[in-house]
Image: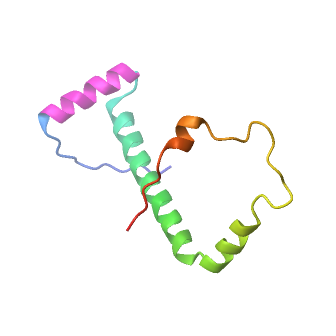
Amino acid sequence: MRRSNFALRVPPTLLAEARKAAESEGVALNQLITLALAEKVSAMRTEEYFEERARRADPARVSRILARVGKGNPSVEGDELPLEFAARKVKKKK
């Protein structure tokens, strides 16, 4: 694995908190920062992936699939929603 150095300017208070977090996790400060950066980048890639899939979705096909849900598969005891869930009103987006 190729390693790179990157000078990072961090406010002293944030650096102190990061050091405390690293110490409490039992890892080096560099490892904590690297992991936090990797998690952020991964989350962004995941979000972009699902946004791209949503853009490519075929609404007509989705509707056909949803229309088949449950056909030939009757509900059984235990499929019911909890009463507190069923009583909630779902807000519709405008």
Which x, y percent locates residue 49? 52, 64
Left or right: where does residue 17 sit relative to residue 71? Answer: left
Q: How many marks?
A: 0
Q: Residue at x 42, y 56 (%)?
A: 91
Q: Nearer the viewer, residue 20 or 53?
A: 53
| Residue at image coords 59%, 75% | 57
Residue 28 counted in the magenta span: no
Residue 18 part of the magenta segment: yes
Instruction: Kindly give the residue lying farthest to the right in the view shown.
Output: 72
Please indicate whether residue 79 sits to the left or right of residue 53 in the image: right
Would you place residue 60 above or below residue 42 in this image? below
Q: Tell me if I can see residue 58 in this picture.
A: no
Rendered image coloring scheme: rainbow
Residue 44 visible here = yes
Q: What quarter of the picture does the C terminus occupy?
A: bottom left
Query: What predominant SS class does the magenta segment belong to?
Result: helix
Which residue is at a point 86% across and 59% down the rendered structure image? 72
Residue drawn 45% across and 52% down? 43
Q: Is residue 31 left or right of residue 76?
A: left
Rendering coords of residue 47 (x, y %): 46, 60
Judge by depth and name the residue closer to the eye, 76 or 62: 76
Q: Hey, which quadrant is residue 22 in on the image?
A: top left
Please state which of residues 14 and 76 is positioned toward the viewer in this rendering: 76
Q: Which residues are magenta?
A: 13-25
Residue 65: x and y in percent read: 72, 69
Q: Is residue 42 above or below residue 56?
A: above
Q: Which residue reaches farthest left? A: 12
22 vs 47: above or below: above
